[in-house]
Image (tube, rainbow, N blue to C red):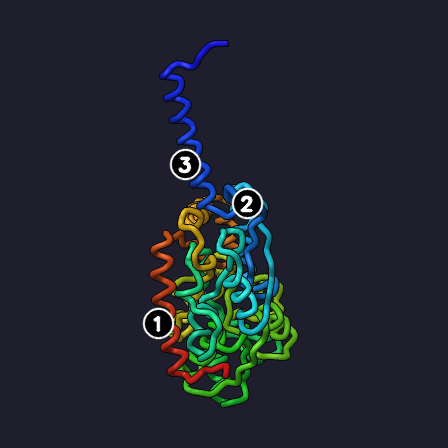
Amino acid sequence: MSRPTRRGLAAGAAGALLGARTLSARAQTAPGGAWPNRPITIVVPNPPGGGTDFAARLYQEPLARALGTTVIIDNRPGANGNIAIQHVVRSAPDGHTLLLQYNGYHAGNPAMMRNLPWDPVRDLAPVGMATVAPHGIFAAPNLPVNTLAELIAHARANPGKLNYASSGSGSIQHIAGVLLARAIGTEMVHVPYRGAAPALQDVAGGRVELFITTPSSAIALAQAGRVKALAIASANRIAALPDVPTTAEAGLPGFVVDAWFAIFAPAGTPREIIERINAAMRSATGLPEVRRRAEEGGVILRPLTVEQMDEVARREIATLGRVIREAGITLE
């Protein structure tokens, strides 16, 4: 049996040290070993069929491929998003539970609820932007209007009688309705729902008259003639509904409504994990299939770094919160 040389002993010691460092780094990356070591769950605070759910499913397969594990979508609607958000906030910060957050909840809920059991800055860590969605103005098929100008005239002729849906009090749809009423100088009645999908079904069924929402959830109904697409509240038309004018083109310049949907993790999630997810998300925005689905869904892909996402989220908390407080919108 040969005896080990000094060089061999040194190499072995160096290898052992490197191995120890690697194991240590893995242990720090995620409790229980290398990350990911089980499926990743993206919790969605809305039911299937709306813009939040669309954003989550847009990234589901690309993230699974890039991160080497299964990605599960877990829809947990209710309480204006708070059921899902609290579930994520209370989850282990190990990168296996993520939140597909909606800016209406992220910035709106803190402004509407004094005793909110979570804080958007303290309890959630920004990961990356999923989609930015311009809003469209959609009307029920039985509403006697076919253009935005006709809608404005109808609303002014019937003050306080026109009703509009939202995915919940304080949501971007709710705020959009408040801002539209202000812009055209009349009153409208707010009808909150638990998500965009049930609201759209009632608009299509003629039970509620108006819905200002993200096109991704309404395009199929608009194309089938089940709802009327009156205008896109953005600077540009969208490819999925090319014949629908912008609000400026339709006679209401300055009325622009955008929403964003982003992935957040529980506070304390290791930065290395957050960066890996962010890199996978930004890479996904370059995939032809993802770009095609985003275009068909009427949403914009905006790959941001973790720092850029944090800046957007903090700015939204300030600006949207101010609009909500000025409008006197509260959930208490």
Residue 328 image offset from top left, x and y in percent: 42, 85
- Judged from the image, the secondary structure of the residue bearing numbered disc 3 is helix
| Spatial separation of the CA atoms under disc 3 and disc 1 | 42 Å
Q: Which residue is mark 3?
A: 21
Which of the pair 176/261 is nearer the observer?
Answer: 261
Pointer 3 with pointer 1, Cβ within 8 A:
no
Pointer 1 or 2: first along the chain: 2
The 10 Å Cα crowd at callout 2, few under 14, some 14 to 19, many 20 or more, is some
The 10 Å Cα crowd at callout 1, few under 14, some 14 to 19, many 20 or more, is few
Q: Is residue 15 above or below residue 123?
A: above
Q: Which mark is residue 318?
A: 1
Regarding residue 124, the answer to whether it shows in the image is: yes
245 vs 229, left or right, is left
The amino acid beneath tag 2 is: Ala
Find residue 166 and report its image quarter: bottom right
Residue 238 image offset from top left, x and y in percent: 46, 60
Pointer 2 or 3: first along the chain: 3
What residue is at 39 percent from the left and 65 percent from the top?
A: 121
Q: Which mark is residue 166?
A: none
- Judged from the image, the secondary structure of the residue bearing numbered disc 2 is helix
The amino acid beneath tag 1 is: Ala
The amino acid beneath tag 3 is: Arg
Pointer 3 or 1: first along the chain: 3
Find residue 42 and report its image quarter: bottom right
What residue is at 56 percent from the left and 74 percent from the top?
A: 79
121 vs 218, left or right, is left
Q: Which residue is mark 2?
A: 64
Q: How many marks?
A: 3
| Spatial separation of the CA atoms under disc 2 and disc 3 | 27 Å
